[in-house]
Amino acid sequence: MSMPGKSDRRKPNTFLKPPKTRQPSVVAMGMEYSLSLSNKGSAISMRIWTYPTGILQTYLSLNRNRISYIRR
């Protein structure tokens, strides 16, 4: 028996699509090198980073403020 007003038809199986998310239009990439020399030898480390431009601009502005504060 089925309840009145409800259909027994089922939707065909479909693959679930991931929800569409807004991707940042521009992504900044950069590399950071650090070289440390010691008596035991040299160590070179490299870091590659990618950030959306909004985060990068905030980071740069914070660094500029800190550098300008140190120079005063």
Image: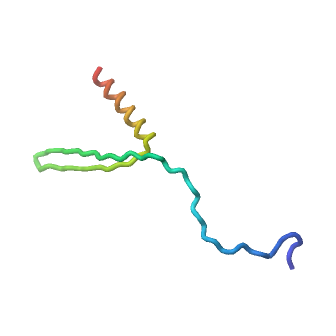
Left or right of 34, for residue 2: right
**Residue furthest to the left:** 39
**Residue situated in front as seen by the camera: 39 or 31:** 31
| Residue 38 drawn at (x, y percent) | 13, 45
User: Which quadrant holds residue 56?
Assistant: top left
| Residue 17 drawn at (x, y percent) | 59, 64
| Residue 37 drawn at (x, y percent) | 14, 44
Q: Give the quarter of the figure containing the C terminus.
A: top left
**Residue furthest to the front:** 25
Q: Is residue 28 above or below residue 57?
A: below
**Residue furthest to the top:** 72
Give the number of marks: 0
Residue drawn at 28 percent across, 45 percent down = 32
**Residue situated in front as seen by the camera: 3 or 55:** 55
Residue drawn at 35 percent across, 47 percent down = 29
Left or right of 33, for residue 61: right
User: Which quadrant holds residue 57?
Assistant: top left
**Residue situated in front as seen by the camera: 2 or 19:** 19
Residue drawn at 45 percent across, 40 percent down = 54
